[in-house]
Amino acid sequence: MLSNIGIPGLVIVLVIALIIFGPSKLPEIGRAFGRTLTEFKSAAKGLVTDSDKEDENEKKAAWKKG
């Protein structure tokens, strides 16, 4: 998704963000975005881990029956 933007597009987006939010708000917005992204990644990893555990439990149950 971001590979289609390119350097000029990224510069334009950053300039527009600077104009809209101002230089004092940008670090705060960046930190909030970083925290949100970290929480999303950990939640996604938790879902994958839970799914893997369920698959293992189903395999163990099938092995015990068979």
Image (cartoon, rainbow, N blue to C red):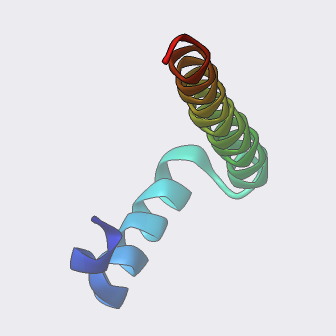
Q: Taking 25 as reference, is 14 left or right?
A: left
The residue that appears at 38% across and 76% down in the rendered structure is 10
Quadrant, the N terminus:
bottom left
Q: Decide: is 53 above or below 23.
A: above
Q: Position of residue 44 (x, y in %)?
A: 58, 35
The residue that appears at 59% across and 27% down in the rendered structure is 47
Q: Taking 60 as reference, is 55 left or right?
A: left
Q: Taking 33 as reference, is 20 left or right?
A: left
* Residue 3: quadrant of the picture: bottom left
The residue that appears at 71% across and 48% down in the rendered structure is 34
Q: Decide: is 2 above or below 43.
A: below
Residue furthest to the left in view is: 4
- Residue 50 or residue 40, whichever sits in front: 50
* Residue 6: quadrant of the picture: bottom left
Q: Position of residue 4 (x, y in %)?
A: 21, 76
- Residue 64 or residue 37, whichever sits in front: 64
- Residue 23 or residue 4, whichever sits in front: 4
Q: Taking 19 as reference, is 6 left or right?
A: left
**Count of number-bearing discs:** 0
Q: Decide: is 25 above or below 7.
A: above
The residue that appears at 59% across and 34% down in the rendered structure is 52
